[in-house]
Image (tube, rainbow, N blue to C red):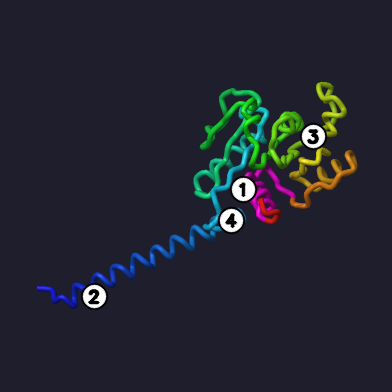
Amino acid sequence: MLLKEDVNQMAKKKKNVKHAEAIKRKSAAEKEMAKLGLDLSDNTAIIGLVFEHLAVSQLTYFGIQSINKICKLYAGIDIVVFSQHIIPPCINPACSVFDTSELDRWSTYPLITTSISTTIEALSGNAPVIYHYSFDPTFIDRQYCKSDELKRAFCDPRVKVVVRHKSHKQLIEEEFDIDVCDTIIPDCNIESLAKLVLTEMKTNGC
């Protein structure tokens, strides 16, 4: 028969093991959140991403893969995707997807756009900051864009331009006489884009 002291000792040991496991889980969670510039005391962060479509392309393939990774790994961030054309995606996204007509209701959180046309459409809404991720900054064959609209996609005060290659940064800066973000983010890495956006939000007190 176990003595009372033995029972107490076992209970204490079990409690210590659980406490150690809880600390270990908390530490792991803190390290994961820190990768996005967040900590456990922060409210859930929300970021919107705007694509022309989610069908097969290099941009959408990398983008959705990265989105799904964030949805799996990070509990402190919610991703919402908007698409100009609702067609079957190349990969099923692990987040909500809306038509860009819903952008009118997006008024508090930052948006990441992924092309000239998505940036122009986002500027019609109320997003306080729009991060124009210029995946392929081509300005040729843009007959459907008026010159003033094209300029707004890069020069509007709400727009911050981010690129995936240093040569793109130089091209856009020379073309539009603006400062492009120094952080280069290759291959539509949404994790890196989210870290950039969330770090700036915290720095600016948003």
Residue 55 appears at what percent x and percent y?
61, 27
Instruction: Say what amino acid the circle numbered 4 marks.
Output: Leu
**Residue 91 location, x and y as percent?**
55, 33
Q: Which residue is mark 1?
A: 191
Q: Residue at 70% of width from left, 46% of height from top?
A: 186
| Crowd band around label 4 with a 10 angstrom C-alpha radius: few (<14), some (14–19), many (20+) | many
> Which of the numbered marks, if any, corresponds to residue 38?
4
92 sits to left or right of 59: left
Whichever of callouts 1 and 4 sits on the residue coming sooner in the sequence is 4
User: Magenta stretch: residue 95 in it?
Assistant: no
Q: What percent of the width, then of the height, locates residue 137?
A: 80, 36
Q: What amino acid is at disc 3?
A: Ala
Q: SS class of the residue under badge 4?
A: loop
Q: Nearer the viewer, residue 134 or 121?
A: 121
Left or right, 28 with respect to 4, comes to: right
First along the sequence among labels 1 and 3: 3
- Judged from this view, the residue extending furthest toward the left is 1
- Residues in magenta, as a range: 184-202
Q: Secondary structure at mark 2?
A: helix
